[in-house]
Image (cartoon, helix red, strand yellow):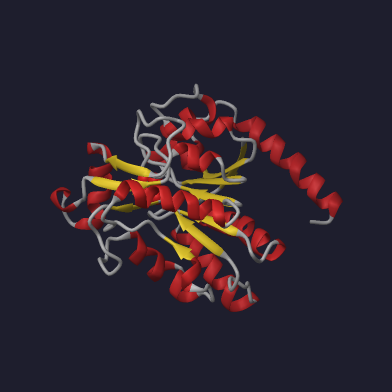
Amino acid sequence: MRVIVEPDSSGVSRTAARFVARLVRHKPTCVLGLATGGTPLGMYQELIRMHRDEGLDFSRVVTFNLDEYVGLGPTHPQSYRYFMQQNLFDHINIDQRNTHVPDGRALDFEAYCARYEQTIEDEGGIDLQVLGIGGDGHIAFNEPGSSLGSRTRLKTLTAETIRDNARFFGSVEQVPRLAITMGVGTILESRQCLLLATGEAKAVAIRETVEGPVTAQVTASALQLHRDVIAVIDELAAARLARRDYYREVERAQELLEADRGE
Ligand code: PGA
């Protein structure tokens, strides 16, 4: 896993946006996997800025979001569809028909989840999957104990996740108990993963993800099995990593290689 440590969260947002933008320029028909939550917000703002100021073109890009709360429709202010419209889709030139967010009000969830997987496959698979991480090490809503081979399905949220997300709903009682989420196995099939983390509340989860054993108790640790993961994190989230100095050395070497290649 490549680990890039930025001084602060705005550095994380800019670096993450650069990776996404590089792909969109290189492959205008790329398939992006997107995440919600507080962490990727700054990256979305930077992508909107690049669209406005630099003409970054999303017209042929296809997107798939990781998850959605069960029971919330697209106009519910806490739904992830609403989040994506407000924070990205309404501000760039993406074709709305190419944006996929799981439907939290699907009637037959089993059939719906299978179809979501099939649609990803029909679009050629995800080129770059953006991921946040939960304080308990979850990716998407793959809570501790999720099978590392899991596919898109319904998942019961843990008390910790419900508590973490209550800040958006006003109270713990209003947070849905179920979500539809891509599985760990689904995520591992994307060609590249971009894991973002900021703040000290993520420091333990990041240590376990990057330097701990691969375990279903920390579903992000499954990323160690993926061939191309870039973790972009700030100093606070990196605080508990034992091999920070080495990751810096690797990045210095990487910069020299890229300068040589004129990137
Ligand atoms: P956050 O959520 O970005 O709001 O911290 C991350 C997650 O729970 O996956």
- Quadrant of the snapshot with the C terminus: bottom right
Which residue lies at the image location 45% right of the left edge and 30% below the top edge?
148
- Residue 257, given in percent of the width and then of the height, sits at 81, 45
- Residue 212, given in percent of the width and then of the height, sits at 50, 24
Name above or below for residue 125 compared with residue 58.
Answer: above
Which residue lies at the image location 64% right of the left edge and 64% below the top edge?
29
Q: Which residue occupies the foreground of this view, 208 or 74?
A: 74
Which residue lies at the image location 42% right of the left edge and 52% below the top edge?
115
Q: Which residue occupies the foreground of this view, 227 or 31?
A: 31
| Observer able to see residue 239 | yes
Left or right of residue 41: residue 233: right
Left or right of residue 169: residue 258: right
Q: Which residue occupies the foreground of this view, 100 or 158?
A: 100
Name above or below for residue 36 compared with residue 233.
Answer: below
Residue at the farthest top position: 213
Which quarter of the picture shows residue 87?
bottom left
Left or right of residue 67: residue 129: right
- Quadrant of the snapshot with the N terminus: top right
Which quarter of the picture shows residue 17?
bottom right
- Residue 246, given in percent of the width and then of the height, sits at 66, 30
Name above or below for residue 91 compared with residue 211.
Answer: below
Left or right of residue 63: residue 50: right
Which residue lies at the image location 64% right of the left edge and 36% below the top edge?
227
| Observer able to see residue 9 | no
